[in-house]
């Protein structure tokens, strides 16, 4: 039920979609997130989601995570990324490491993060700390060992790509890190 990644969610040639597309054509073809409708949508998202103080639209998930990683590194002055095995965050070289190792590389993935594509420099793997999902001890160990060097912890709250694996009760609460980078378990 992928529905063309959401594009066909309402079926093909749905009248409301056709009308919206005609209106979009009238606005012009080169409006890369610059219309009044994008501003309205961003405002509605910020009103609906308490932690969404600002919204930036991107063309893809890969672009979104690339910008996220860059912003977190700039803000914190740190370079490492704690990421969860089995979670997908895009195809770019900053994060396409350590997420989906083949079975024969899983055991070594935590000490030598698996580079998932040719063309990604080996040096990039030193910035990735892969850990298993839903493992509080592994999370606490990664934060304890690498917290002072970590710019961000990135995850899918529900591990969609591996079969919609939900977080264990209380697991997401372990991820609370304040602006000074101090780890707060169980907040």
Image: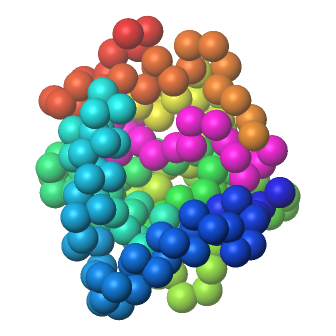
User: In the visual, does 37 lie left or right of 170?
Assistant: left
Vertical arrangement, residue 52 with respect to residue 121, above or below: above
Please tell me which residue lies in front, 131 or 29. 29
Query: Where residue 181 appears, x then y in whole percent?
Result: 23, 31
**Residue occupying image coordinates x 80% and y 44%:** 163
Please tell me which residue lies in front, 29 or 141. 29
Query: Is any atom of residue 108 visible in this view?
Result: no
Q: Quadrant of the C terminus?
A: top left
**Residue occupying image coordinates x 23% and y 25%:** 178
Please tell me which residue lies in front, 177 or 40. 40
User: According to the image, what is the colour scheme of the structure?
Assistant: rainbow
Q: Which residues are magenta?
A: 144-163
- Whether 162 is among the magenta residues is yes
Please tell me which residue lies in front, 151 or 15. 15
Q: Quadrant of the N terminus?
A: bottom right
- Whether 158 is among the magenta residues is yes
Quadrant in which residue 144 is drawn: top left
**Residue occupying image coordinates x 41% and y 61%:** 65
Query: Is any atom of residue 3 visible in this view?
Result: yes
User: In the visual, does 148 lie left or right of 90?
Assistant: left
Query: Where residue 118 appears, x then y in whole percent?
Result: 61, 86
**Residue occupying image coordinates x 41% and y 13%:** 185
Query: Where residue 136 appears, x then y in whole percent?
Result: 58, 21
Query: Where residue 130 appears, x then y in whole percent?
Result: 56, 48
Vertical arrangement, residue 82 with respect to residue 11, above or below: above
The mark total stands at 0
């Amino acid at each position: 039920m992928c529905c063309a990644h959401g594009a066909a969610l309402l079926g093909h040639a749905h009248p409301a979609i056709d009308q919206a597309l005609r209106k979009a054509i009238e606005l012009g073809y080169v409006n890369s997130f610059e219309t009044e409708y994008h501003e309205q949508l961003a405002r509605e998202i910020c009103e609906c989601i308490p932690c969404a103080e600002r919204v930036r639209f991107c063309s893809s998930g890969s672009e979104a995570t690339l910008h996220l990683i860059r912003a977190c590194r700039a803000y914190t002055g740190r370079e490492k990324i704690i990421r969860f095995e089995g979670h997908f965050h895009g195809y770019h070289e900053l994060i396409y490491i350590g997420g989906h190792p083949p079975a024969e590389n899983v055991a070594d993935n935590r000490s030598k993060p698996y580079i998932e594509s040719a063309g990604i420099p080996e040096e990039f793997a030193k910035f990735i700390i892969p850990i298993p999902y839903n493992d509080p001890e592994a999370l606490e160990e990664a934060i304890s060992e690498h917290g002072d060097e970590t710019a961000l912890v990135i995850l899918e709250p529900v591990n969609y790509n591996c079969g919609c694996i939900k977080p264990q009760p209380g697991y997401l609460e372990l991820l609370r890190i304040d602006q000074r980078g101090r780890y707060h378990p169980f907040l």
